[in-house]
Image: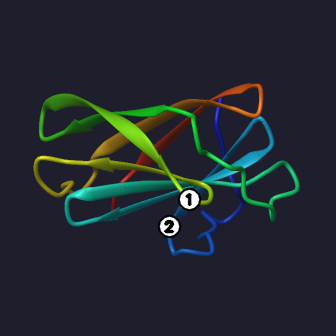
Amino acid sequence: MAQLLQGSKKGANGGEVVVMENHPIEFISKGQEITFYILDEDGKSPVMTAGLAGRAVIQDGGKTTAVNLSPAEPNRFVGQLQMPLGARARVVFSAKVAGHNLQARFTTE
């Protein structure tokens, strides 16, 4: 189960951070693009995402949508939305990274 960092910590890119399997995962939503930054277990080193795949399941405004995420250098997964996320949208990220099945839950403000 994902754990929120104490004090709803913001990541280096200004997004909400959840730690799963000791990997900090930061979520950013800007317009119609969602981005997840993945860090190694030390919380500082980027995890290379090249060749990996991720997915986000989004519940927003009574609708559920799955978004395939593409790797982007150096440690990001990026996806495109049909429209920007609304307030209180729920986003569930999942990917297999560094031998771990990661899943993290986020709620937009």
Q: What residue is at 57 percent from the left and 36 percent from the top?
A: 51
Q: Nearer the viewer, mark 2 or mark 1?
A: 1
In what quadrant of the picture does the C terminus appear? bottom left
- What element does badge 2 sit on? loop
Q: What residue is at 74 percent from the left and 46 percent from the top?
A: 23
The quadrant holding residue 56 is top left
Say which of 8 and 73 sits in front: 73
Label 2 crowd (10 A; few <14 / some 14-19 / many >=20): some
Residue 83 lies, in percent from the top left, at: 11, 53
Residue 58 lies, in percent from the top left, at: 29, 36
Say which of 56 and 77 sits in front: 77
Quick check: 46 above or below 41?
Answer: below
Callout 2, which amino acid?
Gly
Which residue in the protein does label 1 denote? 73
The quadrant holding residue 29 is bottom left
Q: What residue is at 21 percent from the left and 30 percent from the top?
A: 65
Callout 1, which amino acid?
Glu
Mark number for residue 59? none
Q: Residue furthest right?
A: 42
Position of residue 49 in the picture relative to residue 94 (left or right):
right
